[in-house]
């Protein structure tokens, strides 16, 4: 089929068909956008209302709160359908596109497939819209889904390349690699009998990933060993943690209490995935069992995630009122309100944010700030207040990620930062007055390095991997860097607890959920 004939066919389908059969429903799914680099990590299903679990630990029926997707509403007919002149103009534009495609395909100096040209045309079209709308071709779709779900079939190893050699950063707790004894600092010399010398990181990851229940053999050279050992690992469902503490217990689980003397807990959210709210409830239950009296929620470097997850997290700490609302040009406005059941309150709460806290993390910070539930500490957030709709193309072989709506915080403001926004403009989430604490570039790097060190699962004796500082040197380096933002949060909560000192005894009881009899099981 010639390019011109092809475009004539497209024109008939896209423009003329709705005149005969009416608007066609799409299969888009609404998502919250989040990262400046990777703007959206949508859920597998439509964004849900953030209803808390019922007392028996099962999720409440949130069907009534299910947001309707942009594509689930009856879309309007193209403007050209009711305007013959517009119809003619649209056809001329399509003809121009067809002529361009035809010229490139036939006369460009190198052979280019029509698929390459169409993919490039779609990307170029979306690039004109905003930084968060984009096209996900078939070869990138699997990786996109993994980022969305934070879950995949594999063996549970974080790896990096060191002088062309594959090295283990850390095994993930509870995974096949962790159970088999893979350690931080190990070298992986072979995967399924093939050498890893000069392998790319993507290739190594793809070789170790695979369907659940299938097996992969890897050869691992432990630190100080002269011969590699072969391990046969059965691939399992690997869930990337999004709820983390400040340090690990002896069994490699997270230790949630940062200041035992004052009963101050610490929870860090690295993203908002499908299981984030569930895992956060478990962490809160453990803190409750330890009699916590205050909490620091760290959202620094959190690029965001699922809108539904941000709503559920916000709902854990707010008992009533608006959490967030969304509205767009061609979507029905939606609102989500907090519910009292299962709310954790009665204790001081500080939320840490920085310039890399975006989207879903801004939803949480803005909600807690507007309801005076928490003090926001750190620096102004990224400023991303848009929601993307992920629409399947080619029967699910590729996808279109399109900005369809903006979200608004409880006070009605949209925190989105426009491309030409100034510092004096109203965007992002600002720290509460008196709680702005900025880190310079060097301090930011030190903070990231400190966090990476704490995330690594080490040997049972705490030995560092080769090339790293020894245990005492690492501790000294850690102590040399002072996280002033975290210290400000500790100072605030200690002050709040001191102000209630006469009521110190019942304070622990107050930290329990507001409606104890309705508190969902966290385990």
Image (tube, rainbow, N blue to C red):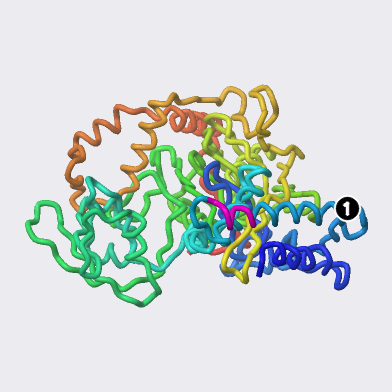
Q: Which of 407 and 200 is in front in this view?
A: 200
Q: Can residue 367 be seen in this view?
A: no
Q: Is residue 135 visible?
A: yes
What is the x, y in percent for residue 467? 18, 41
What is the x, y in percent for residue 4? 71, 62
- Whether residue 105 appears in magenta in the rendering, the answer is yes
What is the x, y in percent for residue 15? 81, 63
Residue under the point 47% across and 59% down? 143
Q: Which of 365 and 114 is in front in this view?
A: 114
Left or right of residue 401, residue 156 in this image: left
What is the x, y in percent for residue 163? 22, 45
Q: How many discs mark residues in the rendered view?
A: 1
Q: Nearer the viewer, residue 523 or 177?
A: 177
Q: In this view, does 370 lie above or below 457?
A: above
Q: Nearer the viewer, residue 466 or 90?
A: 90
**Segment tinted magenta in the rendering:** 102-108
Q: Name the residue under label 1.
A: 86
Quarter occupied by residue 391: bottom right
Residue under the point 61% across and 43% down? 131
């Amino acid at each position: 089929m010639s390019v011109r004939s092809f475009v004539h066919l497209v024109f008939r389908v896209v423009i003329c068909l709705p005149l005969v059969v009416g608007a066609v429903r799409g299969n888009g799914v609404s998502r919250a956008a989040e990262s400046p680099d990777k703007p959206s990590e949508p859920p597998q299903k439509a964004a849900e209302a953030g209803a808390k679990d019922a007392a028996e630990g099962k999720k409440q029926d949130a069907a009534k709160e299910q947001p309707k997707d942009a594509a689930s509403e009856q879309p309007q007919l193209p403007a050209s359908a009711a305007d013959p002149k517009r119809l003619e103009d649209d056809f001329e534009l399509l003809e121009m596109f067809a002529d361009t495609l035809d010229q490139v395909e036939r006369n460009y100096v190198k052979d280019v497939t029509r698929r390459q040209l169409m993919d490039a045309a779609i990307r170029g079209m979306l690039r004109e819209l905003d930084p968060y709308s984009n096209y996900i071709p078939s070869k990138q779709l699997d990786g996109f889904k993994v980022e969305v779900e934070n879950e995949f079939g594999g063996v549970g190893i974080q790896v990096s390349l060191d002088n062309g050699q594959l090295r283990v950063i850390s095994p993930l707790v509870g995974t096949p690699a962790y159970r088999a004894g893979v350690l931080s600092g190990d070298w992986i010399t072979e995967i399924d009998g093939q050498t890893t010398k000069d392998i790319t990181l993507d290739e190594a990851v793809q070789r170790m990933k695979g369907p659940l229940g299938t097996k992969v053999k890897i050869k691992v050279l432990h630190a100080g060993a002269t011969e590699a050992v072969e391990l046969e690992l059965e691939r399992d469902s690997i869930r990337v943690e999004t709820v983390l503490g400040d340090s690990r217990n002896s069994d490699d689980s997270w230790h949630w209490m940062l200041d035992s003397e004052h009963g101050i807990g610490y929870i860090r959210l690295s993203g908002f995935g499908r299981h984030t709210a569930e895992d956060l409830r478990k962490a809160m239950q453990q803190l409750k069992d330890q009699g916590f009296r205050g909490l620091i929620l760290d959202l620094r470097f959190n690029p965001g995630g699922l809108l539904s997850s941000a709503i559920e997290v916000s709902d854990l700490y707010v008992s009533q009122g608006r959490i967030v609302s969304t509205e767009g040009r061609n979507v029905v406005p939606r609102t989500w309100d907090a519910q009292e059941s299962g709310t954790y309150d009665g204790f001081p709460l500080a939320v840490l944010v920085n310039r890399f806290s975006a989207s879903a993390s801004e939803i949480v910070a803005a909600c807690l700030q507007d309801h005076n539930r928490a003090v926001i500490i750190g620096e102004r957030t990224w400023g991303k207040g848009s929601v993307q709709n992920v629409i399947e193309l080619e029967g699910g072989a590729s996808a279109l990620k399109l900005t369809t709506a903006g979200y608004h915080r409880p006070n009605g403001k949209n925190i989105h930062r426009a491309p030409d926004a100034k510092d004096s403009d109203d965007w992002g989430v600002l720290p509460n007055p008196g709680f702005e604490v900025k880190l310079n570039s060097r301090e930011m790097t030190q903070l990231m390095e400190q966090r990476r060190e704490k995330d690594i699962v080490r040997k049972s004796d705490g030995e560092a991997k080769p090339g790293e500082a020894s245990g005492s040197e690492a501790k000294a380096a850690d102590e040399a860097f002072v996280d002033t933002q975290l210290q400000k949060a500790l100072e605030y909560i200690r002050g709040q607890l001191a102000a209630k000192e006469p009521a110190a005894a019942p304070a622990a009881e107050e930290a329990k959920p507001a409606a104890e009899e309705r508190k969902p099981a966290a385990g």
